[in-house]
Image: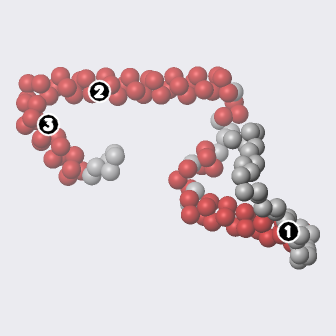
Amino acid sequence: MFLGINGSEFIVLAVLAVVILGPEKLPEYAAQLARLVKELRRMATGAKEQLREEVGDDIADMDWRKLDPRQYDPRKIIKDALLDDFEDAVSAAKEAPAISHKPVALVRTVPLAAHEPAPFDSEAT
């Protein structure tokens, strides 16, 4: 029927409603539910019309199935994104110039005198 409720579950819910609400209040609540459903339908129709007025007739031709998020598999999206990044990294590595393996000259430090303070860089701290 609706919301995944089959006929037997609906009957059980109806019997529970009669028992809980009582036969006196049940018609009153049923009328309130009917008004609520009518109001929701009216609001949905108004929203559709307002959207059609603002967007134009292009919205009538739109294929809404392409925008349905249930059709996307997050595992596939992540896998594709990771493979794209990997392929980009491989292609960048192939295009990068080769690294030379020349020895680097080390900086020779001079030891401090006995009572000489360590150098201080005021901009670094």
The CA span between labels 1 and 3 is 87 Å
Along the horizontal axis of the image, is 29 left or right of 18? right
Amino acid at pointer 2: Ala
Q: Which residue is mark 3?
A: 17
* Residue 119 seen in render: yes
Name above or below for residue 97 compared with residue 72: below
Q: Nearer the viewer, residue 92 or 121?
A: 121
Q: Earlier in the sequence, mark 3 or mark 2?
A: 3
Q: Nearer the viewer, mark 1 or mark 2?
A: 1
Q: Which residue bears the numbered disc 2?
A: 34
Residue type beneath disc 3 = Ala
SS for tag 2? Answer: helix
* Nearest to the observer: residue 85 or residue 2: 85
Taking the spot 38% from the left edge, 23% from the top edge, the residue there is 39
Give x and y (percent) for residue 18: 10, 35
Q: Secondary structure at mark 1?
A: loop
